[in-house]
């Protein structure tokens, strides 16, 4: 029945001979209260449970995306961009999913409290159960790969959403900061350079003399790769390559693969640093070549001077 009944008449306006029953029936008649079918209440209660369930499921998807992005960022090459992981993580954290998760949990709490007996439950119990269910289902969804799928799908079909792949492209297409993203086009073996086309279509002449053999092999596959190094010239565009890393956002990768890539990066950057072993090797090379021909002495390597190598070297000490 209608629930917007007005208060009963005050005691002072009713004679003492009027019973409570008569007063109630009189108020019902005056306010024209009409009964409502029980299925209306059942539908309202069911709708509140559905609202709670839908918000929990959406919260689980938000949790799955947050787990996917956080895991990827944990193993990312943050030394190429920031001095420490905290500032890097705060920059790349998808705040839209954090806000979405918080908003969905508030809606879920209000929906559960609005059910038939939900008002009896403690707000802490309601909130804890909603968050707990979303987080638990989020871990399951993330393990099944839904975090990666949701992020990539929204990036393709939602114009206002920036996926992690798009964020990664923005972070790595910064030649002035020593980062390039693209594919090798032509290798010029005589000069130790390759032609490299970045994601913006610009063609770079990349010097590869200081790359390891494994890096050159990866670069020669013409797959999309990330180059870490330093810009040399803008006209014509020249770039010094110190490391080549695969593009890791083409599909969902297991945590062990991300961890292995992270370890390989650390080892690769540390190999460029001026450790006692490398300094001794350079001195020996210079001594040997200077005896034969001073003009043929090897130039000083430039990769140890880039910021990423310095940061990794400080961490490994």
Image (cartoon, grey):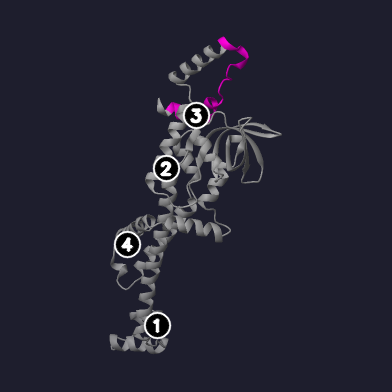
For image coordinates 40% across by 69% down, the residue present is 51
Measure the C-alpha gap from mark 1 to mark 4. 28 Å
- Which percent across, then down, holds residue 136? 33, 57
Q: CA distance from mark 3 to mark 4?
A: 50 Å
Q: Residues within 10 Å of mark 4 (few under 14, many from 20)?
A: many
Which of pointers 1 and 4 indicates the residue nearer the eye? 4
3 or 1: mark nearer the eye: 3
Where residue 138 sits, quadrant-wise, is: bottom left
Task: Work out whether mark 3 precedes mark 4 in sequence or the reverse, and give the earlier one.
Answer: 4
Q: Which residues are magenta?
A: 291-314
Q: Which mark is residue 2?
A: 1
* Foreground disc of the pair 3, 4: 3
Q: Position of residue 246 (x, y in %)?
A: 50, 43
Return the residue at label 4.
126
Task: Tell me the quadrant of the picture where the C terminus can be found.
Answer: top left
Q: Residues within 10 Å of mark 3 (few under 14, many from 20)?
A: many
**Cα distance in 3D space between marks 2 and 1:** 56 Å
Q: Which residue is mark 2?
A: 74
Rendered location of residue 266, percent (x, y): 44, 33
Camera-nearest residue between 221 and 137: 221
Taking the image as shown, residue 209 lies to the left or right of residue 151, namely: right
Mark sitting earlier along the chain (3/1): 1
């Amino acid at each position: 029945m209608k629930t917007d009944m007005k208060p009963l008449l005050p005691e002072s306006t009713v004679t003492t001979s009027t019973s409570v029953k008569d007063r109630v029936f009189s108020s019902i008649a005056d306010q024209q209260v009409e009964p409502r079918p029980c299925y209306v209440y059942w539908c309202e209660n069911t709708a509140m449970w559905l609202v709670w369930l839908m918000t929990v499921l959406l919260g689980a998807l938000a949790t799955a995306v947050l787990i996917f992005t956080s895991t990827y960022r944990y193993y990312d090459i943050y030394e190429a961009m920031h001095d420490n992981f905290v500032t890097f993580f705060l920059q790349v954290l998808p705040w839209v999913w954090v806000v979405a998760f918080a908003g969905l949990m508030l809606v879920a709490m209000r929906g559960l409290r609005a059910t038939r007996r939900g008002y009896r439950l403690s707000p802490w119990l309601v909130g804890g159960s909603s968050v707990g269910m979303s987080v638990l289902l989020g871990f399951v969804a993330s393990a099944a790969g839904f975090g990666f799928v949701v992020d990539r799908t929204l990036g393709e079909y939602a114009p206002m959403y920036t996926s992690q792949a798009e964020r990664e492209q923005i972070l790595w297409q910064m030649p002035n900061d020593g980062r390039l993203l693209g594919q090798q086009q032509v290798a010029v073996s005589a000069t130790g350079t390759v032609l490299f086309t970045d994601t913006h279509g610009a063609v770079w002449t990349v010097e590869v003399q200081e790359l390891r053999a494994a890096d050159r092999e990866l670069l020669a596959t013409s797959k999309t790769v990330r180059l870490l190094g330093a810009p040399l010239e803008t006209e014509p565009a020249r770039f010094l390559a110190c490391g080549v890393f695969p593009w890791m956002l083409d599909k969902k990768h297991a945590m062990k693969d991300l961890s292995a890539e992270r370890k390989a990066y650390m080892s690769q950057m540390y190999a460029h640093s001026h450790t006692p072993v490398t300094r001794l090797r350079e001195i020996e090379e210079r001594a040997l070549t200077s005896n034969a021909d001073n003009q043929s002495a090897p130039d000083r390597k430039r990769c140890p001077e880039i910021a990423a190598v310095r940061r990794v070297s400080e961490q490994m000490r």
